[in-house]
Image (cartoon, rainbow, N blue to C red):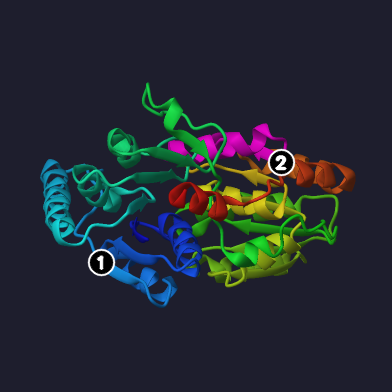
Amino acid sequence: MKIWIATGGTGGHVFPALSVADALAARGDKIIISCDGRVRDMVARGMPARARRVHIWASGVGAKSRMRQMYALFKIAVSAAALSLRFVFSRPDRMVAFGGYASVPAVFAAHLWRIPTFLHEQNAAIGRANKFTMRWVRTLMTSFPSVSGVPAGTAARVVYTGLPVRRDFLDKAAAPLQHAGRILVTGGSLGAQILDDTVPGAIAAMRNKKIFVTHQTRPENVARLQKFYAENKIRANVLSFVHDMAGCIADADLVIGRSGASTVVELQTIGRPAILVPLGINPDQAANAAAFAKNGGGFAVEQNKFTARWLTSVLDELFDNPTRLDKMAAKAYVENRATQKIVDAVTK
């Protein structure tokens, strides 16, 4: 079977696509992956050995400038026309899209040629690109059991599969807490500042001083945070990049971070309690954090309520009651069979 996988934009779209591509390739299916220039190298490094890659001319249309919006739409239209012509001569049997504007041209071309199309939504609130392309797809596959913003009349086409994660996360699924007083702080490049400003002071004020912190931050903040932790006699490892995120999450008794879809699902896959602070400008993150907290795996707190005083109180309560951390970890855990579920849906 020839299967076209459309992805692009960010790693949150790319890594799940590559996981599914690997599983389909292992079945012997012929895989073609389309992506935009921003993730070209990322896709090239992670794609199956015999898969082919196609470059899509596309970018997001969320720019404030009207001219840039029009230019972005023009690029998407040109790529859609190019793929529609390509499918005249080489048509895939299935189209699997992982959202973002880079997937729109492929989904449109597949619709034009009546190719069965499957769309995956990473977040607990449907994104603009996916909401737009829903009219052309057979099935919407979701990372969370409930997704807000799905257009009316499409409920029969929504299937909960979960979000594919890398093998190293699956290998640590449901690992028990070690109760070693370890906290992981991770905000990513864009979301690190409020965590850097709030978390160190809150930890310094804790009653329990036997804490070890792994703190991911932007490169320019590393030295400042290292100095603060050292001056306050807090054991800490401050990093600008975490190479083994699965290992760091598994080692932690508690995670403090943002709530991108990948982060939330990785926490669920391993089963780790967390304090999630959604990026204020991103409604998707708020929905993801709310879904995680609803299950009892942790806290979802708005940025304006995320204060050092509040955080210290919560940390003291949690680390003075390890049984509560165990219960939160159990509630956070969700078995992840997303890759296989997507493969089954696509190839059925």
How much space separates mark 1 and mark 2, taking CA atoms?
Answer: 40 Å
Which mark is on residue 54?
1
In this view, 314 is above or below 42: above
Residue 263 falls left or right of residue 209: left
Give how far across and how far down residue 311 sits, in percent: 70, 43
Q: Amino acid at mark 1?
A: Val
Of 180 and 147, which appears nearest the observer? 147
Q: Nearer the viewer, residue 145 or 183?
A: 145
Amino acid found under the numbered disc labelled 2:
Gly
Residue 225, can we see it? Answer: no
Task: Examine the image and state in which quarter residue 145 appears.
Answer: top right
In reply to whether residue 296 is colored magenta, the answer given is yes
At 71% across and 44% down in the image, what residue appears? 332
Q: Nearer the viewer, residue 232 or 330?
A: 330
Local SS, label 1: strand
Q: Residues within 10 Å of mark 2 (few under 14, many from 20)?
A: many
Classify the position of the N terminus by image quarter: bottom left
Residue at 41 percent of width and 75 percent of height: 45
The quadrant in which residue 214 appears is: bottom right
Residue extending furthest toward the top? 152
Quick check: can you spot residue 69? yes
Magenta part of the chain = 280-305
Q: Looking at the image, is 318 positioned above or below residue 23? A: above
In the rendering, which numbered label is found on residue 11? none
| Residue in view at x 78 percent, y 58 percent | 175
The percent position of residue 13, horizontal first and vertical second, equals: 41, 55
**Residue bearing the label numbered 2:** 297
Q: Is residue 30 left or right of residue 343?
A: left
For the residue pair 20 and 166, the one nearer the viewer reads as: 20
**Residue 195 location, x and y as percent?**
58, 51
* Left or right of 206 on screen, residue 75: left
Find residue 246 and report its horizontal and vertical position in percent: 64, 64
